[in-house]
Image (spheres, helix red, strand yellow):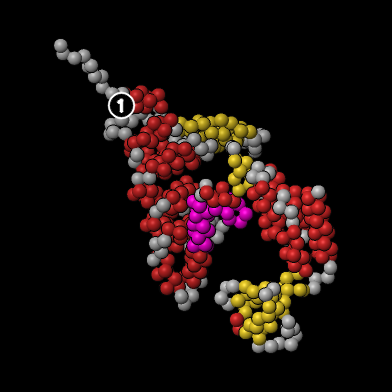
Amino acid sequence: MVCSIKSRTCGILMAGLLYASSLPGTVRAEVFHLVTGGTIEGKLLNTLSDPSPRYVIKTSTGRIVLETNKVVRIERKPDVLLQYEAARPKVPNTVDGHMKMARLCSQLKLMPQREYHLEQVVKLDPDHEQARQLLGYTREGDGWHKVDLWMKQQGYVRVSGRWRIPQEVENDNLREQRSKEEINWRVKIRQWESAIVKGRSTRVEAMRNLKAIEAYRATPALADRVNDMRQPPPRELRLLYIDILGSIGGSVATGTMMTRVMEDEDGLVRERCLEQLRRWKSRRAMLYFIGKLSSKDNRMVNRAGWALGSLGNPEAVLPLINALVTTHQQMVGGGGGINAGFGSDGGVGFGAGGKPKIIQRDFMNQDVLSALSQLVPPGFNYSYNEEAWHHWYTRANTPTAVNLRRDR
């Protein structure tokens, strides 16, 4: 009998709340937020349309008067919230009663109140699956863990709706900061370069600013200017940028100089970059140039050989031996008469006229041989005979036999 009465009472309360939520949004009470941080709930008796230096408020315990300068803001309470507050003490303290009220609060967008009733359900039935899930819990092993709390306990932080480890967030912040710094350097360098190229009155100061650059974050902007072949800076500025990159160092500077050694058409730029790589004794550059020995372009093979000879690292000896003679495709024909093709070794190949065709041809790489001669001891020169070079390399790198027998 008691249960049915409670259930009927809960149903009446819910019907009343739903009815209240459909009424026009008249205000029956306000929350007065005070400068001290506290709040007072009650009904404002003197209307705001007739301003007064004081607020006259009717509360549940009587009437009080507040000076207007004591109030930060006034929050108006809608009817549905007042109806809920009146109904809450009459909600049956049962799993079913609180679940029904939680669902009703969800319909009426009373989310803090919904959470309150779900928590009451969990107090009455700690293993209530639906209430746990609605509160944001997940089952872990034999217990329930609230996702937010559990993630925080594991050291995660919530950023833009995602759980992330603090180190990841810090790295993102650092990347963002780095990006902003790099963008600022790009703007400044272009402005200074423009002043110099266009002969503005600030060109002397601009040149002084460029020469004073020491920040690592400026290296991507400097590298972009050195690598820009569509609108390249004047040669003097390109060489200056290379010198600045050389003084700052780092992976961006190294990568830029390796690329320019292989791809730049300006011989002085290539030599300046290679000189810096040699000063750094860059192993990264050596491995890069070794990789270029297998290029399909015979010109690039010889340029890589030239670079390796300049770097002077003996680890490049065997790759150079293997690249003394390389095979590349060459197009011949395509016209009347005889077609001559010139190789980097100075040799001449002749082909009959007619339709063009692609042939395979062996090239003897002079710059590779020159580099090899710089890296091996004096007196050894087997020209382009790779087999003879391989025999020499094997003998040179085979340890002298050691007698392991012990005297007894």
Q: Residue furthest left?
A: 408
Q: Residue furthest top?
A: 408
Q: Quadrant of the C terminus?
A: top left
Percent of width and height locating residue 209? 42, 69
354, above or below 184, in the image:
above
Viewed as shown, does residue 52 lie left or right of 372?
right
Inspect the magenta stretch and tell me whether residue 66 lies in it.
Answer: no
Q: Residue at x 38, y 36 (%)?
A: 316
Inspect the magenta stretch and tell me whether residue 170 lies in it.
Answer: yes
Name the dominant secondary structure of the magenta segment.
helix
Residue 190 in sight:
no
Q: Nearer the viewer, residue 9 or 328?
A: 9
Viewed as shown, does residue 198 lie left or right of 78?
left
Describe the element under mark 1 as helix, strand or loop. helix
Viewed as shown, does residue 109 lie left or right of 150?
right
Residue 153 in sight:
yes
Q: Residue at x 21, y 14 (%)?
A: 405
Q: Residue at x 69, y 88 (%)?
A: 52
Percent of width and height locating residue 280? 35, 48
133, above or below 320, in the image:
below
31, above or below 348, in the image:
below
Q: Residues within 10 Å of mark 1 (few under 14, many from 20)?
A: few
Percent of width and height locating residue 105? 75, 58
Q: Residue at x 32, y 26 (%)?
A: 397
Q: Nearer the viewer, residue 313 or 162?
A: 162
Percent of width and height locating residue 376? 31, 34
**Amino acid type, residue under disc 1 in the picture:** Ala
Mark 1 highlights which residue?
396
The stretch in magenta equals 156-183
Viewed as shown, does residue 405 lie left or right of 46?
left
